[in-house]
């Protein structure tokens, strides 16, 4: 299992029956493929629909049904389409239970940076600013480091998308909860030691007393 699939499977464990969930572009879109069979989740796409299904089978893509990242997706029975003003009314109105998105950087205060125009690492902020402030729960799903460089920092040094809004960070190394006292490692991938997770993290980690193996 590759890193991205591992992370997406773990994020899917956070889904609850009846949730309205927004998935960011990239890795987070994979979460829709791993929804537990015993729950019903409503995936919302900021470009205007609720009822996102799993990725289409190869050769069965519909070019007219795409997510906010312009990837072909499926729409489940009962799914609905609407304009951008309605979509952002749902987001800004606090009707999204959870948003899952990637990050360039996240820090110990729950600050998030996932865009940077000067270097064009990603094309722009998109709806992330609205999503992380409007959603009830914010999960950052990303690889723990990039080319060996830290992504979980003491303080972000890229332009912020939002301040103090991240609740949970899920990587291939572990699950980290953002608390008032700092970043708490609550689950660990048994392939790594606590020391290895800390070495890959610039911010100081608080190790939960009841640290458990990651659930996937």
Image (cartoon, rainbow, N blue to C red):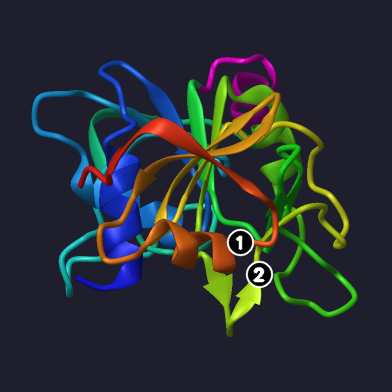
Q: Is residue 95 magenta?
A: yes
Q: Are marks 1 and 2 in contact (CB under 8 Å)?
A: yes
Name the residue carrying label 2.
Answer: 150
Label 1, residues with CA under 10 Å away: few <14, some 14-19, many ≥20: some
> Which of 214/51 is in front?
214
The residue at the point 21 percent across, 60 percent down is 56
The residue at the point 52 percent across, 31 percent down is 82
Secondary element type, mark 2: strand
In the rendered image, the vertical position of residue 132 relative to residue 128, given as above or below: above
> Which of 188/169 is in front?
188
Residue 118 placement (x, y as % from top left): 90, 75
> Which of 174/45 is in front?
174
In the rendered image, the vertical position of residue 79 relative to residue 124, given as above or below: above
Can residue 26 be seen in this snapshot? no
Name the residue carrying label 1.
Answer: 201
Could you give the CA–CA distance between mark 1 and mark 2, rounded to whole angstroms? 6 Å
Q: Is residue 155 magenta?
A: no
The residue at the point 15 percent across, 65 percent down is 57
């Amino acid at each position: 299992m590759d890193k991205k699939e591992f992370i997406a499977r773990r994020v899917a464990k956070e889904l609850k029956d009846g949730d309205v969930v927004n998935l960011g572009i990239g890795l987070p879109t994979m979460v829709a493929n791993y929804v537990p069979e015993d729950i019903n989740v409503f995936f919302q796409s900021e470009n205007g629909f609720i009822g996102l299904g799993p990725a289409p089978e190869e050769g069965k893509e519909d070019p007219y049904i795409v997510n906010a990242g312009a990837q072909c997706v499926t729409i489940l029975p009962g799914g609905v389409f609407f304009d951008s003003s309605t979509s952002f009314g749902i987001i800004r109105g606090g009707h999204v239970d959870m948003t899952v998105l990637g990050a360039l950087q996240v820090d110990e205060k729950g600050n998030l940076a996932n865009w940077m125009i000067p270097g064009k690492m990603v094309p722009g902020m998109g709806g992330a600013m609205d999503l992380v402030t409007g959603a009830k729960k914010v999960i950052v799903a990303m690889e723990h480091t990039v080319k060996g460089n830290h992504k979980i920092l003491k303080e972000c040094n890229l332009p912020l998308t939002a301040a103090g809004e991240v609740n949970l960070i899920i990587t291939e190394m572990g699950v980290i909860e953002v608390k008032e006292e700092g970043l708490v490692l609550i689950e660990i991938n048994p392939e790594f030691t606590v020391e290895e997770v800390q070495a890959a993290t610039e911010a100081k980690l608080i190790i939960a007393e009841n640290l458990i193996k990651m659930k996937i």
